[in-house]
Amino acid sequence: MKKLQLTSSHWGTYRVETLGGKITNLLDFEEDSDPSPIGKGMLDTQEDSCRISSPMVRKSWLDKGFKSDRALRGKDPFIKIDWDEASELVSNELSRIKNFYGNQAIYGGSYGWASAGRFHHAQSQLHRFLNCIGGYTSSKHTYSFAAAEAIVPHILGSFRDFLDTCTSWSSIRRDTKLFVCFGGIPLKNGQISQGGTGNHYQKSNLNKSINEGIEFVNISPIRSDLSDHSSVQWISIRPNTDTALMLALAHTLYSEDLYDKKFIKKYTTGFDNFLPYLLGKNDGIVKSAQWASQITDIDAQSIIFLARKMSENRTMISLSWSLTRQDHGEQPIWAGIMLACMLGQIGLSGGGFGFGYSATNYIGGDFTVLPCQSLPQGENSVKSFIPVARISEMLLKPNKEFHFNGKKYHYPEIKLMYWAGGNPFHHHQDLNRLLKGWERLDTIISHEWCWNSLAKYSDIVLPCTTPLEREDIGMTPRDPYVISMAKAKEPFENSLNDFEIFTKIAEKLGLKSKFTGNRSELEWQKWLYKQTKENAGSAGIKIPSYEVFRSKKWFKLPSPKKGTIMLESFREDPEKNSLQTPSGKIEIFSSTVANFCYEDCPGHPTWMEPVEWLGGEIKSFPLHLISNQPKTKLHSQLDHGSHSRAHKINGREPVKINPTDARKRGIKNGEIVRLFNTRGSCLAGAIIDKNIRTGVVQISTGAWYDRSRKTGEETMCVHGNPNVLTIDKGTSNLGQGPSAHSCLIEIERYQNSPEELKAFSPPEII
Ligand SMILES: Nc1nc2c(c(=O)[nH]1)N[C@H]1C(S)=C(S)[C@@H](COP(=O)(O)OP(=O)(O)OC[C@H]3O[C@@H](n4cnc5c(=O)[nH]c(N)nc54)[C@H](O)[C@@H]3O)O[C@H]1N2
Ligand SMILES: Nc1nc2c(c(=O)[nH]1)N[C@H]1C(S)=C(S)[C@@H](COP(=O)(O)OP(=O)(O)OC[C@H]3O[C@@H](n4cnc5c(=O)[nH]c(N)nc54)[C@H](O)[C@@H]3O)O[C@H]1N2
Ligand SMILES: [Mo]
């Protein structure tokens, strides 16, 4: 008998068709008006050759333990062992590290997106487990927008509060006249919503907004970052120069007396400290349209016209998250908020600014926020942490002092890394540098379900299940749908859920009941739901009983009566609803930040040259590389699925290049090319695209890292992972976020015959 069950993922909800315990199809969820094809990749990867069948240990580690030959990581064969031996090895190694070095020598940050599902959230499980054994060195902030997480609290009092309360599409469609999008609104990204979604609405909201006559301006080096509708204006900006453009827009508003003085006075502080900089009183540089034109490569008249138009219309400013993932990524966010302050429309329907209409489905959604309970993680007794993207720095420079958000800290010395639910070979910059740091580690343990680069570069690999192999609850505060996730099939071979794996290891350590809390998986899920129901009740939200939820399989929370307008209550009464900043107002100048005395993050929005950009001195690498989010997958997840693979060129990740740049280099469409700079190189398949700015090339993130096996070519990835090229530099001493989008490279036709791809082949297994 065919069965149709439900599952939830970061790319949406699906009906899973099974027959005799096997998954036969994945169908769109009937509530989803715009389902994502990314899900199709789940079908063909459940039982393919990339699945990890049993616990595995790298040969040299099994022979010599922590004294293994570390240079053999990624080359050594693996040896299959059973769960008893595996949990014994892991528990002994954790005890050894704990006793010799203390718990801070265990890095458990394990940044990453893992899978949807409230209980089987891999990091929550890992963190709970590591807290049970005495704690771990943790990480702060995200790769998505670390610079904003650090700076925005100084400007608005909080970042997360405003991220989750961006003005809703209903308000935009009613009142916005002009939508100025820094970083565009690329529909590829709206396929994703962290924690799952029942209905994708970004595309319909964007298209309706355009069709109903809202004027859109796409400020991006890539035209396809916004709809190709004829009414959309493309301002092709030189990458990493948005701050200069914003300053020039502000300068035009000021010099033409088009800014809202009342708003500035009533709702902001520090404009007077910022003004001398804008007018060039101290540095002799007026931040005029002419000045910015040189930096941004946008003609001055267009900047002036745009400023006028913004002041004449109800204007929404969208600040993409990508703006933060570049050198000085704090600045475009601060400058964007400052610009919105000068327009004086913050808190009005359809006006002001928002974070990341470009980024995920949920931004701009009208939904009731469900106060979802997460798995209690206990207390971490270790205080040491790193800003998440400083991982290689930590490994390579133990005990070194670093700055972060006004304080000084020291990097701990790490001996063991434990990964569950994140992939550093996907997310980190300058992978060749990461590999050097990797060699400093005694031991690397990971839970993975597929032989991706993280698994291949680990010492002990513990095979986990996929969401289709376990029951769970798909719920997040950012989506109105709550989904009962079914166990559609039995776990692949010897895979176990992360919870079961940690239970086994905890048992070896005599900590089983501490870790499990004496609850089974299903008892935990019931508890999470009941807690959520209780929290919801206190917030005046009614949800069905656990039993009714499980039998009905899903429900949708009613939409709130009123759409969201960011900072509406602050605008209504800035005294009663003051912000959590020192002044209670929006800080255009922050004396807190100024007092940190960071040269790379002064007290007000400031243009500073990025470390690598097209306006700089470096001439050997003349192309700016944008490595943005992939259309056909989520990060590295499902790169091995048919949907992602169908878009590769001779198996390599596509790189888009402008016809002029291609011609100069004799590159033809569909050819294999080599991208390189001093940090490394990768192969890719060329796509010639006039919608990319001259001097800019684009390659999506996500190709599974596949190091060349040729002597002398070790810094090359033969598949197309751009992170062999990107720079490993903190955005500033304040944010220390990743600067992936600041990267110069060169491209050439690849004359040799490209090496065989091993990205999707498992390692040798004994
Ligand atoms: N060059 C460049 N680099 C970037 C970016 C960029 O713009 N440019 N963007 C950055 C951003 S914004 C982000 S968020 C990061 C994303 O980086 P990550 O979140 O680390 O990337 P994912 O591929 O989603 O990694 C999730 C991992 O969890 C595993 N996994 C899934 N489900 C489970 C589970 O149930 N249990 C366990 N144990 N594991 C599971 C998957 O197999 C996968 O390996 O990348 C960053 N890196
Ligand atoms: N399909 C899919 N969607 C995703 C993800 C995924 O992996 N796949 N990942 C999700 C995650 S984790 C995140 S954090 C969000 C990220 O959301 P974003 O950060 O908004 O996404 P990106 O695609 O990296 O960047 C958006 C656009 O910014 C442009 N851009 C790059 N540099 C500059 C610049 O200097 N100036 C200007 N003006 N524009 C620039 C690029 O052309 C790019 O297409 O996306 C989410 N959505
Ligand atoms: Mo992200």
Image (cartoon, rainbow, N blue to C red):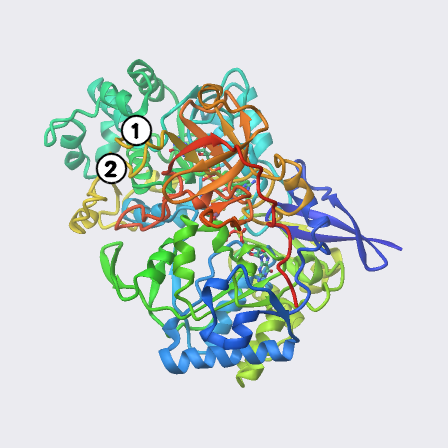
* Foreground of the two, 276 or 100: 100
Q: Residue at x 38, y 72 (%)?
A: 105
Neighbour tally class for label 2: few under 14, some 14-19, many 20 plus, Cα within 10 Å = many
What's the residue type where badge 1 is placed? Met
Circle 1: element type: helix
Disc 2 C-beta below 8 A from ligand 2: no
Q: Residue at x 51, y 49 (%)?
A: 710
Residue furthest right as drawn: 1
**C-alpha separation, residue under disc 1 versus residue under disc 2:** 10 Å
* Foreground of the two, 745 or 498: 745
Q: Residue at x 61, y 50 (%)?
A: 758
Circle 2: element type: loop
What's the residue type where badge 2 is placed? Pro
* Foreground of the two, 628 or 713: 713
Q: Residue at x 55, y 43 (%)?
A: 719
Give the residue number, with chain letter if any, for mark 2: 605
- Give percent across and percent down for residue 161: 40, 49
User: Is residue 350 shown to the viewer in this render?
Assistant: yes
Neighbour tally class for label 1: few under 14, some 14-19, many 20 plus, Cα within 10 Å = many
- Do the residues under discs 1 and 2 have CB atoms within 8 angstroms? yes
Residue furthest top as drawn: 301
Say left or right for 27 vs 184: right
Give the residue number, with chain letter if any, for mark 1: 246
- Give percent across and percent down for residue 518: 60, 80
Q: Which mark is residue 111?
A: none
